[in-house]
Image (spheres, rainbow, N blue to C red):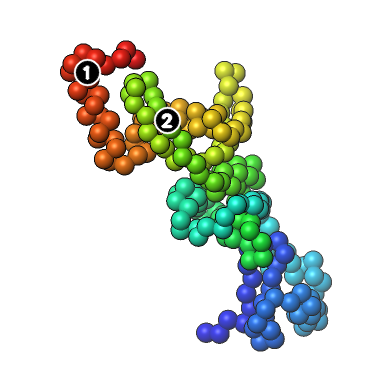
Amino acid sequence: MRLVAASVGEPSGHLIFLDHASTGDGLIGALQVLALMVRTGRPLSELAREAMERVPQITVSVALAARRPLEEMPILAATQTRVREALGEEGRVLVRWSGTEPKLRVMVEGPDEERIREWARELVAASEELKSWDEGCLSLPEHYAEVVRPTRVAVRYLDENSRKREVEADGVLAVCLQHEMDHLDGILFVDHVSALKRNMILRKLRKAKKLGTLAAE
């Protein structure tokens, strides 16, 4: 089967008619639409209603310092998988690098505009630069390790009056938010380090507890 036309998930359209050209061309696209109107004798408004169903779409571009391969961005990949599974057959998610500038393009489509807007922001946050931070915890007193986390985060939560709130943070506050949210999932900072480093810290804690020298939490 021969592909004679193709389009990509951008508002700009980028129609490619391989019988006429191998690249996107707006003039050829317009001529093909006019030809269809002449053949059918129907107005464009009527043809458009049958050609597609409009659904909410959120498109965001984020400029990053380095153009890393998407397969080397595991947090972004995990977030994209989670969003795609949540959307199921009701929408789609597309993440790709721009072909002309160092920007990451994020597009999410789905029936609920507010929800896909939130997902788009989560994908952007997941693509941010990572940084190594020296972390400790009262659960593991007097022990520290370097943990790699995103430098910026956006957190949604319900306040004491059950109203939706959102906070964006970077630097130390971003680290603290991620650290404390890990606790909600039963995760400690040592779960982010190598098994060798984690076991070394745990052995020292067990020894300190046995000797009665473990600091009070």
Q: Secondary structure at mark 1?
A: helix
The residue drawn where x is 42% and y is 37% is 147
- Where residue 23 appears, as percent x and y from the top left, is 67, 78
Q: Amino acid at mark 2?
A: Glu
For residue 61, above or below residue 114: below
The residue drawn where x is 59% and y is 60% is 97
In the displayed structure image, the side of residue 133 where residue 124 appears, left or right: right
The residue drawn where x is 54% and y is 39% is 151
Examine the image and state in which quarter residue 208 appears: top left
- Where residue 94 appears, as percent x and y from the top left, is 57, 58
In the displayed structure image, the side of residue 17 where residue 131 appears, left or right: left
- Where residue 89 appears, as percent x and y from the top left, is 51, 56
Q: Nearer the viewer, residue 66 or 98?
A: 66
Q: Residues within 10 Å of mark 1 (few under 14, many from 20)?
A: few
What residue is pinned by disc 2?
135
What residue is pinned by disc 1?
209
For residue 82, above or below residue 181: below
For residue 110, above or below residue 25: above
Q: Residues within 10 Å of mark 2 (few under 14, many from 20)?
A: some
The residue drawn where x is 66% and y is 61% is 101
Examine the image and state in which quarter residue 161 appears: top right
